[in-house]
Image: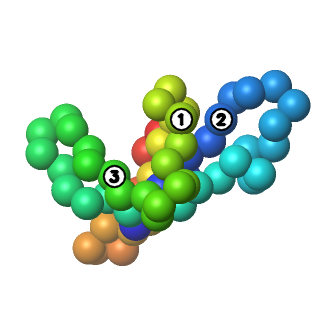
């Protein structure tokens, strides 16, 4: 699964600010997300998760 953080800053395209990461682990309501060095989004940016589960059903979570 890929994570697409977006920003709501005025005048900044979400495509320009998109950083891709991966879900490292999930424990209860807590997600550990890993990003490449220097690509971590700001703390209040939304994480958008898009992918498919093991049965092929689409997953879209914001």
x 19%, y 35%: residue: 29
Q: Which residue is mark 1?
A: 42
Q: Report the Cα–Cα distance between label 1 and label 3.
A: 13 Å
> For residue 22, which quarter of the picture?
bottom left
Query: Given the current orientation, which residue lies at the most extreme left position?
Result: 27
- Which circle, 1 or 3, is nearer the viewer? 1
Q: Residue at x 12, y 39 (%)?
A: 28
- Tell me residue 3's x, y (percent): 47, 56
User: How dense is the environment of label 2, judged by Cα within 10 Å: few (below 14), some, or many (20 and up)?
Assistant: some
Q: Image check: 21 left or right of 26?
A: right
Residue identifier under label 3: 33
Q: Residue at x 36, y 57 (%)?
A: 34
Left or right? Give the position of 15 relative to 38: right
Foreground pick, 1 / 36? 36
Is disc 3 placed on a helix, strand or loop? Answer: strand
Secondary structure category for the residue under label 2: loop
- Left-right relation of 14 to 61: right
* Most foreground residue, 5 or 42: 42
Give the image quarter of residue 10. Answer: top right
Pointer 3: residues within 10 angstroms few (<14), some, or many (20+)?
A: some
Instruction: Say whether residue 50 is visible.
Output: no
| Viewer-side label of 2, 1 | 1
Q: Helix, strand, or loop for circle 1?
A: loop
| Residue 40 x/y as whole percent | 49, 48
Image vertical order of residue 30 relative to residue 54, above or below? above
Report x, y in % for residue 16: 77, 51
Kindly indicate whether the residue at mark 1 contacts the one at mark 2 (C-beta within 8 angstroms).
yes
Q: Which residue is mark 2?
A: 7
């Amino acid at each position: 699964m890929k994570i697409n953080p977006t920003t709501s800053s005025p005048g900044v395209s979400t495509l320009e600010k998109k950083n891709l990461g991966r879900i490292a682990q999930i424990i209860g309501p807590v997600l550990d997300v890993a990003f490449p060095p220097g690509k971590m989004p700001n703390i209040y940016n939304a994480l958008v998760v898009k992918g498919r589960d093991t049965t092929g059903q689409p997953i879209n979570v914001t």
